[in-house]
Image (cartoon, rainbow, N blue to C red):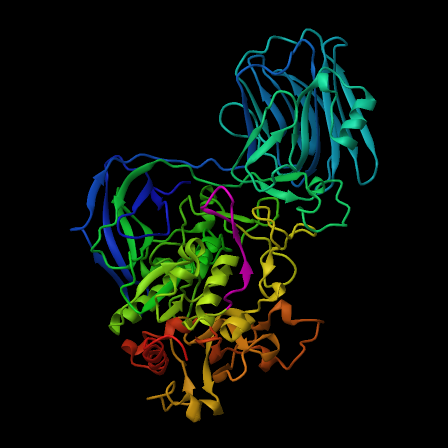
Amino acid sequence: MVLPLIGYADRFSAKPGETVRFMVSSLASEPYVATLVRLVCADPNPDGPGSVEVDLSAVFRSQFPSRPQTTDVGSRANVTATTCPYSRDAGVSVLATIWPTTPQKGLQDIISVHDAAGGFALSLGEGGRLQFRWGRDAVVRLPTILRPRRFYRVWASFSPLHGVLSIDQLDLDTGKSEHAEIGLRDAAGEASDGVAISIAAAAGGTPRHHYNGKIERPAIASGGLTDAEVEHFFNRGELPPAKTVACWDFSRDIPGTIAYDTGPNGLDAQLVNLPARAMLGSNWSGREMSWRHAPDEYGAIHFHDDDLGDAGWEADFSWTVPADLASGIYAMRLDGGGHRDHLVFAIRPAAPTATLALLLPTLTYQTYANFARPENPELRERISVWGVAQNIVAEHPEYGLSMYNKHSDTSGVCHASSNRPLLELRPGQLHTFDPKGSGLLHFNADLHIIKWLEDNGIAYDVLTDHDLHREGPALLAPYQCVMTGSHPEYHTSETLDGIEHYVKGGGNLIYMGANGFYWRVCFHRDLPDVIELRRAEGGVRSWASEPGEYYHAFDGTYGGLWRRLNRPPQRLVGVGFSSQGDYSSSYYRRSGASYGADAAWLMDGIEDEIIGDFGYFAGGAAGLELDRADPLLGTPDGAIVIASSEGHSDAFRPVNEEMETQHPPRPLPELIRADVTYSQNGAGQVFAVGSMNFAGSLLWNGGDNNVSRLLLNVLGRFNQGKGL
């Protein structure tokens, strides 16, 4: 069921003079109205800081006709041939190696050809059995149900000369082969120009019959093949040249979106909706773990019936950022048919206008976007009681999945596009039921930081991870201080390098969250709005990459934790991910060092021993995910641990990478804690809060509290100038 009013912007940020395009789907019969607004806070909690949205109708407000736009979910490879590449009178053979993941899910086409005579298709059919259809009605099937996640060689043919429709399969795990055939006369017919070919879905018309699983080197041959020719194809990947219609080599140009045909007709296939590449083939030997070193062993593509690479919507309108609009977080608010939506984006300055930059963790926003969480009746009741409009993400798979979800075949979602509605990137979106507070995460949690800056009259510019990835260290260099969001978990090599270069060069960094700088992601070579994630060995993760598939297809780099790549967060910001629990929070207790002369400037005006035993995120400043200092992992010499959390619920456990055996390597209190730290890194200074829920305490009591005072002390020093 599609949402009645929904859309997305074509970028996360823009600066004056740049144009933002907006894609909208509206089911209303009347036009909708688009109004520019600036977002300051979006907490729907009746007892919280509230929603602050500045109406900028004077800058932009306009009306546009409503129209529905839909998504086309499911990956495949498509070929359109202007002339028919085969002769039906000669018959055809089709071949592939497959690794099905949901063989009993219904009709799934492996190779499908559509022509005027009805075409043909090699498919998984009734009950998970291999079948071959010729024309509109003739079908031959094998009796055995295919097992999931096993490699099979499959081939089928129609011979008009002999009047036989045949099909074969070989289970590469057991060595068992099967053959079936039926007689079929007068079934050749005439093919016409304009033939459509699809791999992993039905060809021609509306996309359907999507296949789940891997396909390796699919091919079409003219006429029948001898047993020796079939054997040669599966062993060498070659068909007799005179019989070759198409032979697609999925090991060529793995980062790209074209499946290249090595045959004489040049029937290259366009990959649709980003199926997963750099997947193990049936011939993987285990001698190489990187596809770059043995691409011929990574000649499979994993297709999914719920992949979405790009919604592909047309732009309803565009808007160019004026020169006099301040940097901040904005949205194009849509109103129509009794519904409302916000299309969020940031405006960055043409040149720095403040000494402080807030670096929004947009890579993390994109990774989590459309996370279909388990059903939560308490959250639904909260939504009803508070009377807030919400997108229940799990009810809308048509907008694509999150990289925290699994596909329908239980494989992990390793791609995320921003060219689609990102349902959680909406003001006021609740993420979980929070009996003590608001239940906010990510974007809406970061708006608490925005409001705190505004309330305290602190000038700031807004930048994004995507800006930093494109522009590198030069983006941050002009600023005295850079502040992160509450959960900067995902980083490319370029963003991590940019932050490290900034700090070591004398920049001051405030790390406002936890579980940051944790996973590596990368951008697609040709599609700048798509990122890839391989959840390699270790880490707290909702799914794990298959063995041998730890290297990104997009750029060939090794995926997984930055800690596994010898860049633990402690080396950059003094603390790193140590423990995770439920959505609950506790408090910090000051250390002895916090009373020393070196920390006097940090604790100025704070007499309390307990810090942050309050807040809008689960009732405290230290919660959900916790970072700790650890010299063994790179916390700089001389770092000051100002305070550490305690009293966490039994739901908190050490993260996976800390557990070398079933027994924790240290007493649990040493691992289950959040450390507030000050450290020096190169010529720069770093303040880290060690908790994902810290930002939820800033606005408590109107901002008059010890968490707010601590951060004001830090900014007061960090904003004075770069360097120690």
Can see residue 44?
Answer: no
Q: Which residues are magenta?
A: 515-531
Can see residue 197?
Answer: yes
State whether residue 637 is above or below residue 653. Answer: below
Q: Quadrant of the N terminus?
A: top left
**162 part of magenta stretch:** no
Q: Quadrant of residue 267?
A: top right
- Residue at (82, 31) in percent of width and height: 177
User: Residue 146 at what x, y percent from top left?
Assistant: 73, 36
Q: Is residue 395 left or right of residue 152?
A: left
**520 part of magenta stretch:** yes
**What secondary structure predominates along the stretch shown in magenta?**
loop
Q: Quadrant of the C terminus?
A: bottom left
User: Residue 284 at what x, y percent from top left?
Assistant: 75, 44
- Residue at (33, 61) in percent of width and height: 462
User: Residue 495 at what x, y percent from top left?
Assistant: 47, 59
Q: Residue furthest top?
A: 186
Residue closest to the eye, 81 or 708 = 81
- Residue at (44, 43) in percent of width and height: 399
